[in-house]
């Protein structure tokens, strides 16, 4: 094998290696982008579920079903806890979670509704809302 043939074989091998590396890089980029979109969609879905859970808690409080409200609030708090670290990376969703917490904190503390007074025999509800209102 002469030098010219060796150089041609080496050029072909380097070309294949370059195309492979480029393909892997692009594949990784698009996979990462799709993963980020999926995480954002999941976070927004968790935001919706959290708001619905808090509305369920309010419905239970209206019906004076305090034990069920306690269960629903625990579920909502778990969802909030699971979502908060991810929400730190998305300012819009973080602000939405904060707004929902503030809304239900105001409702809980409102003298018009009297939820905190009526549920005074349920310390789990008190603690749950204290953690939301912090």
Image (cartoon, helix red, strand yellow):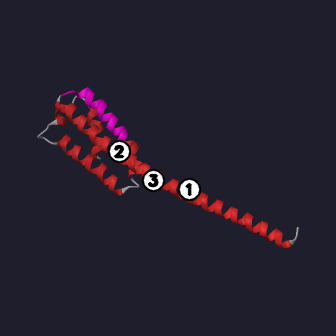
Question: Residue 58 lies in what quarter of the image?
Answer: top left
* 100, above or below 5, in the image: above
Label 1: which residue? 28
Q: Earlier in the sequence, mark 2 or mark 3?
A: 3
Question: Residue 78 lies in what quarter of the image?
Answer: top left
Nearer-the-camera pick, 58 or 121: 58
Residue sitting farthest toward the right: 1
Judge the density around disc 3: few (<14), some (14-19), many (≥20) Cα neighbours within 10 Å.
few
Distance CA(mark 1)–CA(mark 2): 26 Å
Judge the density around disc 2: few (<14), some (14-19), many (≥20) Cα neighbours within 10 Å.
few
Q: Are marks 1 and 2 in contact (CB under 8 Å)?
A: no
Residues shaded magenta: 64-80
Judge the density around disc 1: few (<14), some (14-19), many (≥20) Cα neighbours within 10 Å.
few
Q: Earlier in the sequence, mark 1 or mark 2?
A: 1
Looking at the picture, how far across and down is residue 80, in whole percent?
35, 43
Using the image, tell me which numbered label, if any, was put on residue 45: 2
Distance CA(mark 2)–CA(mark 3): 14 Å
Looking at the picture, how far across and down is residue 131, in whole percent?
31, 42
Nearer-the-camera pick, 50 or 133: 50
Distance CA(mark 3)–CA(mark 1): 12 Å
Q: Give the residue drawn at x 21%, y 27%.
A: 65
């Amino acid at each position: 094998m002469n030098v010219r043939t060796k150089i041609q074989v080496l050029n072909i091998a380097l070309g294949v290696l370059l195309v492979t590396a480029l393909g892997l890089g692009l594949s990784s980029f698009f996979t990462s982008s799709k993963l980020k979109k999926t995480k954002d969609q999941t976070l927004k879905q968790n935001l919706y579920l959290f708001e619905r859970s808090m509305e369920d808690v309010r419905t239970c409080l209206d019906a004076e079903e305090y034990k069920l409200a306690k269960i629903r609030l625990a579920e909502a708090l778990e969802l909030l806890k699971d979502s908060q670290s991810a929400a730190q990376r998305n300012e819009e969703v973080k602000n939405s979670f904060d707004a929902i917490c503030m809304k239900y904190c105001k409702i809980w503390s409102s003298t018009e509704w009297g939820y905190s007074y009526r549920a005074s025999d349920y310390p789990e509800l008190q603690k749950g809302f204290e953690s939301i209102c912090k």
